[in-house]
Image: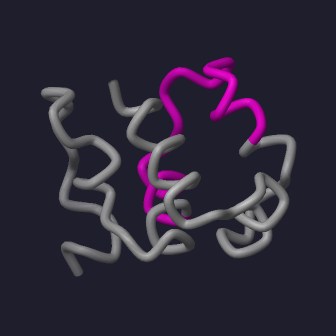
Amino acid sequence: MWLDNLKRIKQEKNLSTAQLADKANLPEKTVIRILKGTTANPYMDTLDRLASAMDCTVGDILADTGAVTSKIGRNHR
């Protein structure tokens, strides 16, 4: 599941939720809701910001989930 990937990458990068939110330029409450699963389908721009903050790609977050991504985001410009 993509959320498991997101949490794993966050942990591998040794980032707190506050640090991740700051690096992604997102409200900490938004990141908390995503990590708790409250926000089940975050915007692609949000995932792109999180990926960029963790120095990975949206594809890394969505790996092995079967999710289809649009051609929007830093990796497709």
Q: Is residue 47 left or right of residue 75?
A: right
The residue lying at 24 percent from left, 74 percent from top is 75
Q: Residue furthest bottom?
A: 77
Q: Is residue 16 left or right of residue 72?
A: right
Q: Position of residue 54 (x, y in %)?
A: 51, 69
Was residue 40 drawn as part of the magenta stretch in this picture?
yes
The rendered magenta stretch, by its main secondary structure, is classed as helix
Q: Is residue 11 left or right of residue 4?
A: right
The residue lying at 20 percent from left, 28 percent from top is 65
- In which quarter of the view is residue 68 placed? top left
Q: Position of residue 34 (x, y in %)?
A: 64, 33
Report the quarter where the C terminus lies.
bottom left
Q: Position of residue 20 (x, y in %)?
A: 70, 63
The structure's colour scheme is one colour
The residue lying at 53 percent from left, 36 percent from top is 42
Report the quarter where the N terminus lies.
top left
- In which quarter of the view is residue 59 placed? bottom left
Was residue 41 drawn as part of the magenta stretch in this picture?
yes
Q: Nearer the viewer, residue 43 or 9?
A: 9
Q: Position of residue 36 (x, y in %)?
A: 69, 24
Q: Which residues are magenta?
A: 32-49
Residue 48 to residue 17: above or below: below
Residue 63 to residue 59: above or below: above
Residue 69 to residue 49: above or below: above
Q: How many marks?
A: 0
The residue lying at 15 percent from left, 33 percent from top is 64
Q: Nearer the viewer, residue 11 or 50?
A: 11
